[in-house]
Amino acid sequence: MLLQSWVLFSIITFFSSSIISKVHAATHVYNWTTGLGDYNVDGTDTRPIITCNGEFPWPDVRVTKGDRIIVYLTNGFSDRNTSLHFHGLFQNGTSLMDGPEMVNQCPIAPNDTMIYNFTVPNNVGTYWYHSHTQGQYMDGMRGVVIIDDNETYNGNSSYPYEYDEEMTLSISEWYHSNAYDLTATFLNLNNPTGAEPIPQNLIINNTMNLTWNVEPDTTYLLRIVNIGGFVSQYFWIEDHEMQVVEVDELCHHAEV
């Protein structure tokens, strides 16, 4: 009898939790149109880059596990295809929303619109989205995705570590040539060693001149995302100790 009662209680608790989870899940709708605009991203050279609704940088996306994301992506280019990939999301059961053209979808032709519609039931952490067409993300078509947990820790945090404030830092190399030309040079027979193109600059949060104010005796959670195309990078803060708490969604413990 005790076992039956426990099983019944577990079933009721499970269904109650499922109902509460569905009630609190939100739907986030985005309407994005690609375009081209001249921007001086690194402060040294102005060149055409890919814009979102006529602006740069592309917006960051922040949702909670269990939420639904709907993106209306319109190809505003006149002479090229495009696509959209949410990097690192499992897309279990929604592989058609994964983005790589000619793999999971046909490319989005000029003046056409594709609707990306999926939920994030089992991802938590820091990710990014980008075009999955001809290296377009190196020309600016990219942004950060943060998925908060729908469970709380320590009473008020969606992350299992105590911290006071958080900041997101996207790091990338930056070239004065477009991705199409860079890729052609990289794959050329005259580059037999596969040497990667050398960038003109490195940028953080889409600028060369990022500064932010910090307070003493304050613990910061830094979400660091490499949104670059060719270059790996090292990141450190001089005279500060840091602890790695997550790598590609997996919780991790390492002093650096």
Image (spheres, helix red, strand yellow):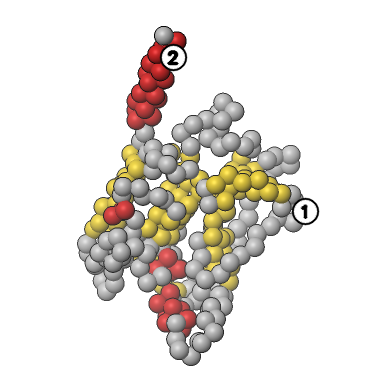
Identify which residue, 213 or 148, lies in the foreground. 148
* Amino acid type for the residue under numbered disc 1: Asp
Q: Indicate the position of residue 70 as horizontal and vertical percent values.
A: 31, 47
- Relative to 1, is 162 on the left or the right? right
Residue at position x 70%, y 55% in the image = 237
Q: Indicate the position of residue 11 as horizontal and vertical percent values.
A: 37, 21
Identify which residue, 205 or 120, lies in the foreground. 120
Give the residue number, with chain letter if any, for mark 2: 3
- Check the picture and name the quadrant holding the N terminus: top left
Q: Are marks 2 and 1 in contact (CB under 8 Å)?
A: no
* Amino acid type for the residue under numbered disc 2: Leu
**Residue 161 placement: quadrant:** top right
**In this view, 86 is above or below 195:** above
**In this view, 242 is above or below 67:** below
- Relative to 215, is 173 on the left or the right? left
Q: Indicate the position of residue 200 as horizontal and vertical percent values.
A: 57, 75
Callout 1: 10 Å neighbours few (<14), some, many (20+)?
Answer: few
First reached walking from the N terminus: tag 2 or tag 1: 2
SS at mark 2 in the image: helix
Q: Can residue 60 be seen in this view?
A: no
Q: Indicate the position of residue 154 as horizontal and vertical percent values.
A: 59, 28
Image mark for residue 175: none
Residue at position x 48%, y 43% in the image = 124
Residue at position x 51%, y 87% in the image = 192
Q: Residue furthest bottom?
A: 190
Identify which residue, 8 or 34, lies in the foreground. 8
Q: Which of marks 2 and 1 is in front?
A: 2
Identify which residue, 138 or 232, lies in the foreground. 232
**Residue 68 placement: quadrant:** top left
SS at mark 1 in the image: loop
Give the residue number, with chain letter if any, for mark 1: 239
